[in-house]
């Protein structure tokens, strides 16, 4: 199932870009006799908990005009998969460029607990060693601003030494943890009490992502005026819980037009179902009416509440879409010829009631599939979608390739340059995902297999499987494992 590796020779970044983007070899060779071209800058944009529901893919759950406009200038990967369905571990795989190898790599503290083994060869560390300025604002690793101490506002650093500067903007929120889970006008979450959605009737600056965008916009001016190439990572918080955004983004959507998932029931038998602990435990679901009566609401049994939550998620998506649009507009001002490589990536998806789950933390499609878009100078066939299955670990080698940097040998991914050149390029690599309890998944063009290891090792309990035919059953409604033992054997052999 793997694409056969091709033999390649390392060439300078300017040469690769010249050939990749349609320039002739002769022109690239001519430039080699002149002063070497500066390596391209990189703007990396991370969005937290964004499902692969975008207008450019024909899905209109939330209005995303900024992302859709960017997609028309970029390569959209409609089948991009992350490796772990939780924030910190997914970002660890991105920044290491490797699959999770141990249980520690599956936790939200994966970076904090393992970074000493790989920090210098991380994505920012590698660019820094190759003479790039490296900066990050907002949430790029698990801890926004890169600090892991009290309130995520003091040391030690999560990724020490690889960012020239890593920070959160000065804002009404008192510290990083409050900003990450921020409500309107500087209010912090009260765990177990604050509601999971909010729509304050105020400006975009009433919520955190407008502040991230504002600081990032100012930073672009400073970076673009310098001579050194840069890698600038900008991490937005929404649509991560709480689904909190200004009321105008709430009013942009009609809750009655937000379609419910096709499958909202708990799977039968062995499954990846969980009780949505982040949603149920970190947020309050008791509501007081005008008569002072308290009602506990649960989307599993309250269709109107489920509709309201989907409405809140859509509002948060449109809000962050607008902030990304502000940043991209500024980039067009400081770089009108679009010489900057831009990557837009989300750390995982989010189930809005699919399989009776409200959250991620499982290996179903909507948890591990997320947006990935890449724009580079002179991209041919811009706006065309690649439906090939790609993975988060492919981002690191893609960027080293496009920037003309040598690639660390331990990376698990492959450069997506062939798909940037031609979105229809043959590409038959599967995607792998991992979760606690040694659960693993493989996604091919047709199949998703989820392996649930036998839990009673002394009794040699057999592994259990969920197998879905994604061509005939894209909603993963029917487990067909018992009908296809030969497919299971074949797919298991592919797992790393």
Image: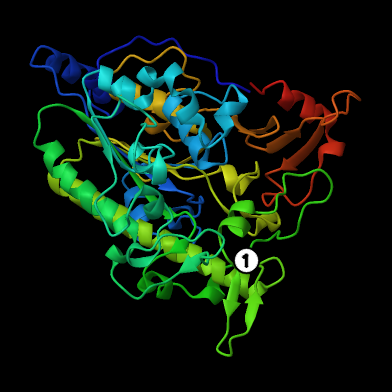
Which one is nearer the viewer's eye here, 201 or 405? 201
Would residue 310 be visible to someone looking at this image? yes
Relative side of 187 to 414, left or right:
left
Establish if 369 lies above or below 262.
Answer: above
Total marks placed = 1
Establish if 255 lies above or below 432.
Answer: below
Q: Quadrant of residue 7?
A: top left
Q: Considering the numbered disc 1 on the image, is that residue within a helix, a strand or a loop?
A: loop
Q: Residue furthest right?
A: 459
Q: Which residue is mark 1?
A: 260
Relative side of 451 to 43, left or right:
right
Q: Residue furthest front?
A: 150
Which residue is rendered at x = 37% and y = 57% of the image?
A: 320
**In x, y percent, where is residue 411?**
46, 18
Which one is nearer the viewer's eye here, 107 or 124? 107
**In x, y percent, where is residue 494?**
67, 22
Relative side of 361 to 348, left or right:
right
Which one is nearer the viewer's eye here, 164 or 435? 164
Q: Quadrant of residue 261?
A: bottom right
Colouring scheme applied when the structure was drawn: rainbow
Which residue is rendered at x = 54% and y = 65% of the image?
A: 193
Would residue 428 be visible to someone looking at this image? no
Q: Quadrant of the C terminus?
A: top right
**In x, y percent, where is residue 495?**
66, 23
Q: Quadrant of the N terminus?
A: top right
Establish if 35 lies above or below 139.
Answer: above
Label 1 neighbour load within 10 Å: few <14, some 14-19, many 20+ = some
**In x, y percent, where is residue 188?**
41, 60
């Amino acid at each position: 199932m793997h694409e056969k590796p091709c033999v390649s020779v390392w060439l300078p970044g300017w040469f690769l870009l010249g050939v990749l983007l349609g320039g002739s070899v002769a022109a690239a060779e001519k430039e080699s006799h002149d002063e070497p071209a500066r390596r391209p800058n990189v703007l990396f944009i991370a969005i937290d908990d964004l499902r692969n529901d975008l207008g450019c893919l024909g899905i209109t759950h939330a209005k995303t005009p900024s992302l859709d406009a960017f997609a028309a200038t970029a390569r959209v990967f409609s089948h991009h998969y992350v490796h772990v369905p939780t924030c910190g571990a997914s970002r660890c795989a991105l920044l290491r460029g490797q699959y999770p190898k141990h249980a520690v790599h599956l936790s939200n503290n994966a970076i904090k607990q393992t970074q000493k083994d790989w920090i210098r060869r991380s994505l920012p560390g590698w660019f820094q060693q190759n003479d790039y300025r490296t900066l990050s604002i907002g949430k790029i690793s698990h801890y926004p601003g890169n600090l892991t101490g009290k309130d995520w506002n003091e040391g030690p650093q999560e990724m020490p030494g690889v960012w020239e500067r890593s920070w959160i903007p000065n804002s009404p929120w008192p510290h990083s943890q409050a900003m990450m889970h921020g409500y309107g006008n500087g209010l912090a979450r009260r765990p177990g009490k604050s509601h999971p959605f909010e729509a304050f009737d105020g400006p975009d600056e009433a919520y955190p992502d407008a502040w991230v965008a504002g600081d990032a916009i100012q930073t672009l001016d400073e970076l673009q005026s310098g001579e050194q190439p840069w890698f600038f990572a900008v991490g937005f918080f929404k649509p991560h819980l709480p689904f909190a955004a200004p009321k105008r983004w709430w009013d942009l959507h009609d809750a009655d037009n937000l379609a419910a998932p096709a499958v909202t029931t708990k799977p039968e038998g062995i499954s990846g179902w969980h009780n949505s602990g982040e949603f149920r435990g970190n947020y309050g679901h008791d509501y007081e009416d005008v008569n002072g009566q308290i009602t506990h609401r649960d989307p599993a049994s309250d269709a109107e509440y489920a509709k309201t939550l989907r409405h809140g998620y859509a509002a948060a998506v449109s809000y962050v879409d607008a902030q990304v649009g502000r940043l991209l507009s500024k980039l067009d001002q400081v770089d009108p010829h679009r010489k900057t490589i831009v990557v837009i990536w989300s750390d995982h998806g989010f189930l809005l009631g699919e399989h009776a789950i409200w959250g991620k933390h499982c290996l179903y499609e909507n948890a591990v599939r997320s947006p990935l878009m890449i724009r580079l100078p002179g991209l041919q066939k811009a706006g065309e979608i690649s439906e090939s299955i790609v993975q988060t670990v492919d981002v690191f080698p893609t960027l080293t390739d496009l920037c003309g940097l040598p690639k660390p040998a331990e990376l698990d991914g492959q450069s997506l340059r062939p798909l940037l050149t031609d979105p229809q390029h043959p590409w038959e690599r599967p995607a792998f995902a991992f979760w606690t309890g040694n659960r693993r998944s493989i996604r091919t063009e047709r199949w998703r297999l989820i392996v649930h290891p036998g839990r009673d090792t002394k009794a040699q309990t057999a592994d259990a499987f969920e197998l879905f035919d994604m061509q005939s059953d894209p909603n993963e409604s029917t487990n067909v494992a018992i009908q296809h033992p030969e497919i299971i054997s074949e797919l298991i052999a592919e797992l790393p």
